[in-house]
Image (spheres, grey):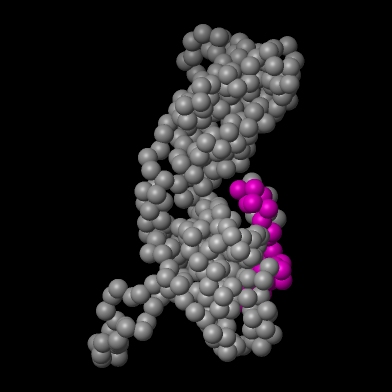
Amino acid sequence: MTELAGVADAIIVAAGASRRMGGIDKLHAPLLGRALLAWTIDAVAAARSVRRVVVVAPRDGVETLGAEPWLRAHGVVVVAGGSRRQASVAAGLAATDAPVVLVHDGARPLVSPGLVDRVAAATAEHGAAIPVRPLAETLKRLEAGVVAGTVDRADLVTAQTPQGARRELLVAAFAAHAPDGPEEFTDEAALLEASGARVVTVLGDADNLKVTTPEDLERAGAILAHRLGPPRVGQGRDSHPFGPQDGLALGGIVIPAAPRLHGHSDGDVALHAVADALLGATGQGDLGRIFPAGDPSTRGVDSRELLAEIVRRIGALGWRPAGLDLLIVGARPRLGAERLDAMRDVIARLLDLAPEAVSVRASSGNLDGPEGAGRSIAAQALATVMRR
């Protein structure tokens, strides 16, 4: 496979309407704590044959999607799609220049890098290739709801993605069949077939399902959890007294009118507790071991930077955050839903998690000690991690 390294650009089609998901945007639906599309991008980008990933998004979602950290980490290019699949693929094609182009459904998060590479290799050799699976069920032909015959399935298969073509073949196919023309093609193989191209096949993966219903999402989660193995859990706790200056850093946001917490960094007890929980779950000690209190390089540092570094470190060890429950304890300041939601969103981004996988709560009543007296704030975190 060495000669195929970086031979392909991959287009991930993510501009669909998710009509069968009950109003849920399936590509951003949480799958083991992350957006479904994040798993898809990770898998495709991990293939040795892929040098660039282009995501085709709805026109009104390009800016939002482009800001996602899990997308930026791979240097993904985001372009606006069209009203039909072929128009979206054509838009993605314009952002590619590799000799081989692979087109993959954003709703197939369980694709393996190995399958991506097999399709790329077959495409480079033969011009166009798709992954297929043999049919397991007996097929019946109906007339007015009554069985009219049994269909021979010997030569029938189901098609998967990614589907590959040499770039010049795909460009020629779109020249012959305009993306906004009267013909509609349900996949790239159909477009290539209509253009006279020869499309070969490789054996697809049984787990490479397309998520189109809530039941599919549950099944994908079960398969993915089995692949990754059991999760691990860690606890973290931190407490800091209030200092004389205003500008409280808490949960990744700043509350200007509240007093700042005393600490070597910015004193954000919430993020410190989260970092400790992640370190505990992965057996890496605590935050003070990695960032000693006397280290001048971290004096006054933004704790978001510290947490981002912890996420990077556990990632290098093969772990990723999968869920978080954070409790902030203190009589002041009062933390309403708006502030707690803002903290949740910041932390979710730092941990590369869907907001639904992060809980941020506050306790301000019936407290003892310095937290109850309003002299300090404490935070407790429970974090779950899973293998990448």
Q: Which residues are magenta?
A: 70-97
Which image quadrant for residue 375? top right
Which image quadrant for residue 143? bottom left
Q: Nearer the viewer, residue 281 or 15?
A: 281
Q: Nearer the viewer, residue 161 or 183?
A: 161
Q: Residue at x 45, y 72 (%)?
A: 202
Q: Residue at x 55, y 58 (%)?
A: 47
Q: Nearer the viewer, residue 125 or 208?
A: 125
Horizontal side of residue 164 vs 218, given as left or right: right
Quarter of the N terminus within the rendering? bottom right
Q: Residue at x 64, y 61 (%)?
A: 6
Q: Is 77 within the magenta?
A: yes
Provide residue 219's location: percent of width, then percent of height.
Answer: 37, 56
**Total marks placed:** 0
Horizontal side of residue 65 vs 35, given as left or right: right
Q: Nearer the viewer, residue 138 or 369?
A: 138
Q: Classify 54 as above or below 89.
A: above
Q: Classify 319 as above or below 256.
A: below
Provide residue 3's location: percent of width, then percent of height.
Answer: 61, 63
Provide residue 284's location: percent of width, then percent of height.
Answer: 51, 26
Residue 362 shows up from this direction: no
Q: Classify 114 as above or below 227.
A: below
Provide residue 97's location: percent of width, then percent of height.
Answer: 71, 68
Q: Residue furthest front?
A: 2
Q: Residue at x 60, y 22 (%)?
A: 290
Residue 290 shows up from this direction: yes
